[in-house]
Amino acid sequence: MRSILRSIIKIGNPTRLGPFSHRQLCAKASVVATIPHHSALQRYEDDLQNEFQQILREERQSVLDPVEDPMSLEVFPNTKPAFNFAAYVNKSPTLQQLVSLGVELHKLEKRKGIAQFVLGLDFDRDMKNHIRFLADVGVPAESLGEFLTKNPLIFKEDLGDLETRVNYLQSKRFLPEEITRIVTKDPFWLMLSTKRIDRRLGYFQKTFLLEGSEVRSLATKQPRLITYNLEHVRKNSFTVQEEMGFEKEEVKQLLLSKPRIWMIKTEALQYRFEYLHRRMKLSHAEILQTPDLLLTRDVRIKQRHGFLKFLGKVQYDPKKELYIPLKSLAEGTDEEFVAEVAKSNMECYNRFLKTL
């Protein structure tokens, strides 16, 4: 991959059981069934794909207009979704160059119209300068393949427009390393015009009463939020403030500390808060101190809190003895939690899980 880049630009270096007592439950070894869960990476990629479809649809509407059902429109309605690059790779220097850069062609095959678009490009004529531009902006060599896999349509953008969009960020006092992070972490950012990005940043600044430095911090920390579906952002804002009961300043604190809260499903956010606040009796202040709980899988919180309750060790007040940090419900492996926090063993924990 680096040899190709050097030719473009110089690159720097469970079953429900009957009740058990604590003694009975922990007396015998048992192997707990593996709990199925979706790959976090796959969820991330699915989200990116949905977001980009949203971006393409918004080209014909105001940023603040309500967004239609993401599944109601398709990016390329007149092309077939099935395609296979295998018959072309050996004959196409362009595809060979992309493979060398780390582009995952099998993922492009699954997206309508993308394969045909890529096959119509010439590497030297249509791609080389765009790759040089991304490298100049600071996208790491090892991240270029992932970037182009996520957003091959970057090659349809005019280079002058891309430079203008980077210049806009510079004019807003984003540091070079912040611009690099934004472009790298959100491959779709550069697809938006400066006018639309300006409106997006203005929306967050006005809605959450942010200072200029806070807007830059938010955009750098979670650039995908800035280009995310604004209708969804509004829904989660309403949920956090009106349904969950956080004050405006607390909402701002949550946004700046854990902006991804505004990108998760509204129903999941509501359910987690209800469990934390109603069932676990955590105050708003306690949740604010450990906002990661709102981003943690429900099953993990339930299992760990339930196990501590079963052991008689639920004590989340730091002013009292035998204090259990709330962050331990969200961090680390189950093995670490059981041994270091619950002071128990995996045999006991596995048997407890079978009672759920």
Image (cartoon, grey):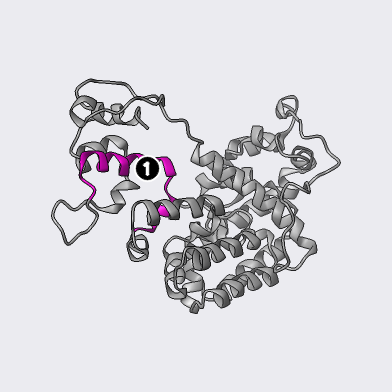
* Residue at the disc numbered 1: 302
Instruction: State the residue in front, 298 or 54.
Output: 298
Horizontally, residue 340 falls left or right of residue 293, namely left
Q: Is residue 35 visible?
A: yes
Q: Is residue 13 visible?
A: no
Check if residue 107 falls in the magenta segment.
no
Q: Which residues are magenta?
A: 290-314
- At 37% from the left and 45% from the top, the residue drawn is 301
- Residue 203 position within the rendered picture, expressed as x and y whole percent measured from the top left: 61, 73
- Against 187, residue 209 (above or below) is below
What kind of element bears circle 1?
Answer: helix
Residue located farthest toward the front when viewing the structure as drawn: 19
- Residue 354 position within the rendered picture, expressed as x and y whole percent measured from the top left: 35, 27
Residue located farthest toward the right when viewing the structure as drawn: 78
Quadrant of the frame with the C terminus? top left
Instruction: State the residue in front, 162 or 353.
Output: 353
Q: Quadrant of residue 119?
A: top right
Q: Quadrant of residue 346?
A: top left
- At 18% from the left and 28% from the top, the residue drawn is 23
- At 65% from the left and 67% from the top, the residue drawn is 165
